[in-house]
Image: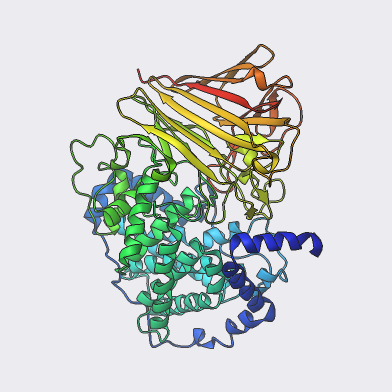
Amino acid sequence: MSISQRLPILLKAAKQLGLSSLGLYACYQIGLRSGYFRWVTSSKKNSSFQEPAPWSIQAGILHMPSRASLLSVSNANLSELLSLADEINMGEVHLFGGPPVPLQLVPPGPLAHWTAYETGQAKSTITDIKWVWEPARFGWATILAQAYLASGDERYAQTFWRFTESFLDSNPPFQGPNWSSAQEVALRLIALVFSIQVFYQSPHTTPNQLLRLSQAIAAHARRIPPTLIYARAQNNNHLLSEAAGLITASHALPGHPQAKHWHRLGRRWFIRALESQIADDGAYIQHSTNYHRLMLQLALWIHILGEPLSEQSTQKLAAATQWLLNLVDRESGGVPNLGPNDSATILPLSICSFSDYRPTLQAASLIFQGTPAFPPGPWDDLPIWLDRIPPAFPTNASLPLSEKKITSPLSSSSSLPSPHTIRCPDHSSWAYLRAAQFTSRPGHADQLHLDLWWRGGNIAMDAGTFSYNDPAPWDNALASTHVHNTITIDGKDQMDRAGRFLWLDWAQAEVISHELDPNAPFERIIARHNGYQQIGVIHQRTVTAEEGGHWSIVDSLQPIYPHLTPSIKPHNNQFLARLHWLLPDWPWKLDSEQRNTHVSLQLESPPGVVQLYLRIDPKGILSQPEIKVIRAGEILYGSGAIETTCGWISPTYQSRFPALSIEYQALVQLPVEFITEWNLPGRD
């Protein structure tokens, strides 16, 4: 792209992202390109890493649960925990929640200074750098630590040191891709400090090993401050992670001459980040359930260290806990796969699956809200590490506390905080309607996406992420509008994509009304967004949940008249409108009638038959509607061009599985309505 083509984008980005963020990012680039970062993190300038240190790792900085208390919660899952640890003993690890792969800690190719990877001077054959970074986060070490504490088996201590020393040998300070991201350095620092607290008393932990690890932790801590301006420019989980890393280093190495500086710097930016990144209603700045959980995990880690937080940040964390609780499925612990998802999780101190959010939320609810969110269960192992054994759950609490029904009449958007969920009366189904007012960078172009859950499963799904860095078309392609459960107009995204992670001209949504009357046999929410206003269209969606598992979704496309809105360009009032639904890969049967104006789809799900009905208001149709069923990028029914990214679901990073994409489209004139109806069977 030429300079003349990039300049309008840069000017627009400066206006929409803010001069402060762009200024910090420019300072980072200057430090990178000028060689300053290379100089300040050079081995010569930090030659003390190889010298004997008068300071060493502090033991006893964490509450260490007794074996009895740990087994009281996780004994039923002890065999699974030990099985995971035994796999690590054999040199295999589960990355991103996927199948076991070899634990590779030696980066490929000759090593260069970390700045060379950021400037592109160091060439790499790696398709996605996260395959290198993920094992180097040392999440596997925390599994070994838990297994050691629960079993006392010294093999796990031996394995920890075998792989840790291998990493230190092959990744000297500031050399190689594992030092290029200060966030990766911080997350590894946290995992190392946690693990050594468990293995400190092992006979396989020698004074020389402790000294070497002390030097490594100091090197990690020194890597973070020079590029903290990049994390400040991002103002997201990077800043929280790096600040938490500095706080951790100050607790682990209290005798280090930089310890007080690390503590002041880390505490300052950790608290500022919490206060600025969490909205008053608890929503997190990155518009992602996975990063929302990561933020709570980082806050819980700081709590484990005994670090006090400000009153405002504690209040924000209580709201953030409730926000995510409102999106948890009560049967599975799953949440909508909202926004970017790189499967980030720190200190996985629970044997529950990666997709189960209950361990983090049970702990966060106890710490930040003062009460358990769920009845006793296997998700209570994380609170044990926080020295919080959950009290007896109230006997009258048949549902998690987050799911108590709000009783209020018809409400306006001004009084309705996010997330916007509705529940089918007397039925095991619920939905989340994405309707965001963006004040920070969106992660996905997903306004009015609908997630539908039924009997513990996600049946109208968000495709997820898959990869940030793979070659096209998989370079963060699942952020686009066309893979979400919403309407696409003329093949356009709701916002302008200016980069792999950058959206401009943000689509804004508002909830018009939400009927929450508990005495009515239904619940209804109405919302709209303005992402297509420049072509003269407003998209409004009405979602109604009725008794007996019946759901109705009405998508209304309404005109914006140029004489009322002068900034809108006149249009010929003809649009190609496409409705998309992403469904599980279940056996299906399609019955289309009346020139496809009425479509019936039957899904054979494990719990029973699901009926899906689609139709378009005939008054607005200008061409024969088309129905397509796509699986794994291939058409099973219908004809015409398709996106190869359709028909996939990515529950965790770098994993994808076939799903069913239902495309229903037609050339229409405004106003027009698309109607979707779901019939979900109840329990026997």
Farthest residue to the top: give it. 594
Residue nearest the observer in this picture, 500 or 79: 500
Residue nearest the observer in this picture, 602 or 65: 602
Q: Answer above or below: position of 496 versus 527.
A: below
Asked whether, in this view, residue 69 is left or right of residue 215, the answer is left
Where residue 462 appears, as percent x and y from the top left, is 54, 39
Where residue 40 appears, as percent x and y from the top left, is 58, 84
Q: Which corner quadrant holds the C terminus?
A: top left
Asked whether, in this view, residue 238 is left or right of residue 428, the answer is right
Where residue 413 appears, as percent x and y from the top left, is 44, 42
Q: Which corner quadrant holds the N terminus?
A: bottom right
Q: Quadrant of residue 534?
A: top right
Q: Answer above or below: position of 181 versus 516.
A: below
Q: Answer above or below: position of 667 versus 168.
A: above
Q: Quadrant of residue 388?
A: bottom left
Residue nearest the observer in this picture, 251 or 643: 643
Q: Residue at x 39, y 55 (%)?
A: 280
Whether residue 17 is visible, yes or no, is: yes
Q: Answer above or below: position of 186 versus 502.
A: below
Q: Quadrant of residue 14?
A: bottom right
Residue nearest the observer in this picture, 276 or 62: 276
The type of colouring in the image is rainbow
Whether residue 80 is visible, yes or no, is: no
Asked whether, in this view, residue 546 is left or right of residue 552, the answer is left
Q: Residue at x 65, y 17 (%)?
A: 618
Where residue 305 appears, as percent x and y from the top left, is 32, 68
Number of marks in picture: 0
